[in-house]
Amino acid sequence: MTMRSFPETSSPKCRLAILAIAVLVQVHIGAGYLFAQNSRIALGPQDAKTEPITRQETLRGSVTPEREWWDVLHYHLQVEFLPESRRLKGSNTITFKALKPGNKMQIDLQPPLAITRITHGDAKLKSQQELKFEREGNVYWVMFEKDIPKGTEDQIEIFYEGVPVVSRNPPWVGGITWGRDDLGDPFIVTTCQGIGASIWWPNKDHGSDEPDRGMQISVTVPENLVAVSNGRLKKTDHDVASKTKTFHWEVLNPINNYGVNVNIGNYINLTDKYQGKGGVLDIEYWVLPHQKEAALRQFKEVPRMLAAFEHWFGKYPFYEDGYKLVTVQYPGMEHQSSVTYGNWFRNGYWARDPCQCGVGLKFDFIIVHESAHEWFGNNISMKDAADMWVHEGFANYAENLFVEYHFGKKDAEDYVVGTRRGIRNDRPIIGTYGSNREGSGDMYPKGGNMLHTIRHIINDDAKWLSILRGLSADFWHQTVTTEQIESYISNKAGTDLSKVFDQYLRTTKIPLLRYSVNGKSVSFYYDRVVKGFAMPLRVSLNGKEIQITPNEVKQTFEFSEEIKTFEVNRNFYIEAAKEL
Ligand SMILES: [Zn+2]
């Protein structure tokens, strides 16, 4: 397919690999002009915020007392998309459990959408009451008549409607895209990573709480359109009188809020099956009719992706919900069990090579990167947006693991080392806790290179593979903190990597190995490192590799012959400078 399939998408922009693109621009100034413009726009949400954290950010990004006392068990979102008036109208039924007594609940919904009514209790039991609520910006305070006792399982239904925010730049800027495909049919999509799911539906908008029993998503659209969401399509209702159809989708597993999505268009459905580590995985491709041939050709990448990632990370985490690719007019997003795809049915990332080494054109970047998030992002999800490297660092790293599985180690190393050109070291990878402020976009290539470096510190492929598989299995369907991931890797590796994590995640400094050669001896020490940093390293002397463990104090190594060349193994992400 060509760009004409997506008339509203006139230029490439992607949250994912935008840093690599930004570098491309500098190299190919003419051709990259549009990239340059859009990379600036796209980087917008990731730009450093230096102003003080606002109360609204605290409410959005922290576990407030009004969030802490209750645990989401299930969401049932029912929402009608009204393309003519560009409105949404619907409700969300939240089933929750009181972890301790509480009578005031925080529900998030961002203007201009508004809550119109909230009921408490089960309608079928005729025990429903209307609840009082008041708004404070993006937050609603919902008041119960009396304390909900600890341990109680209860239900509220929140009715809402309005004209939602329109996305100016999906997927980086959240909201609704009321688009059209190239045949003129409506092509409507939701995106909300970063800004939050409360940009289009009311919920508890914090990463730490996912609905333990999953979610139902019932989407009503004009009868000539198809609505595709997460999980499996259970049934479709056709209301002839109102000329609408309602598509009922069901997700059985916990799901992060921003992973919930709805895509509406003139979709057709192609199906496939994959015999994997968890049995038979049902695969669906939802594409526009004219994309069918290209999709059947390009989506052969999907079983290759599954083979690689089930090898490295263990079984696909959502067999019950199936795996889907759904075409959209933006590059892609890791919507759980419903990965969205807009990569032109071509290899690379919008036909560009993130590493600029040729390897990036050997695979479909969006299928590989976004699907890697099924393991890191959707299976293992961050509690706090400050720890987003757990999603993006691993997804970036997974690209090179895919390459290693299918093309071998040399290509994989070329790729991961090549993506370093996108690292800016502008600010730390870890963001600001409790405020929904992400860290640097370096979380992608620098996060990936940190993991690659750690693999080479451990220097034991079997052990590394067991750590990767162990992460997926031991944090199965959980939300985590970076500390949990860091200490898990250190423990399983049998070596304290805390200084390595501190260096790469919490500073912008790249270790500098200063060395000097004198006859048969070489002296070396680390500069620009956190206190106590003593990362083992492999270097080649006259082409013969040895291991050294530099620290901040100068050490001298005596070699068996006069040293003519000194080279650091490229898999370690450091810099080296020769001193005279
Ligand atoms: Zn990603």
Image (cartoon, rainbow, N blue to C red):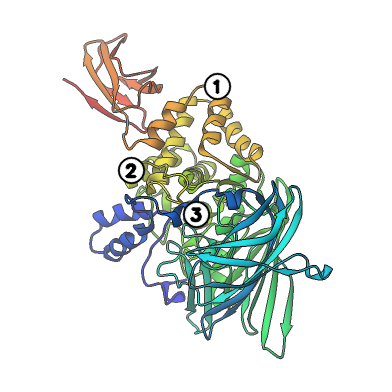
* Residue at 60% in and 41% down: 313
Q: In the image, residue 434 lies at what x, y percent?
A: 47, 47
Mark 3 residue CB less than 8 A from any atom of ligand 1: no
Q: Position of residue 481 (x, y in %)?
A: 54, 40
Q: Select label 3 or label 2 by which is in front.
A: 3
Which comes sooner in the sequence, label 1 or label 2?
2
Q: Residue 427 — which label?
A: 2
Q: Position of residue 522 (x, y in %)?
A: 27, 14
Identified at 46% across, 58% down, the residue is 347
Counting every numbered tag in the picture gives 3
Query: Which residue in the structure is indicated by mark 3?
Result: 59
Q: Could you give the CA–CA distance between mark 1 and mark 2, rounded to whole angstroms?
A: 30 Å
- What kind of residue is marked 1? Gly
Q: Is residue 13 above or below residue 554?
A: below
Q: Say which of 4 and 382 sits in front.
A: 382
Residue type, numbered disc 2: Arg
Q: Which residue corresponds to the image point at 29% horizontal and 28% vertical from the top-left? A: 528
Mark 3: few/some/many CA within 10 Å (<14, 14-19, 20+): many
Disc 3 marks a residue whose amino acid type is Leu
Please state the horizontal and vertical placement of residue 80, each as a whole percent of the image. 62, 77
* Viewer-nearest of discs 1 and 3: 3
Q: Is residue 187 above or below residue 17?
A: below
* Element type where label 1 sits in the image: loop
The mark that comes first in sequence, 3 or 2, is: 3
Q: Is residue 573 visible?
A: yes
Q: Distance between the Cα atoms at labels 3 and 2?
A: 24 Å
- Which residue has dot 1 on it? 494
Mark 2: few/some/many CA within 10 Å (<14, 14-19, 20+):
some
Q: Residue placed farthest to the front in the image?
A: 146
Q: Using the numbered discs, state the Cα–Cα distance from disc 1 to disc 3 in whole angstroms.
A: 39 Å
Question: Which mark is drawn over residue 481?
Answer: none
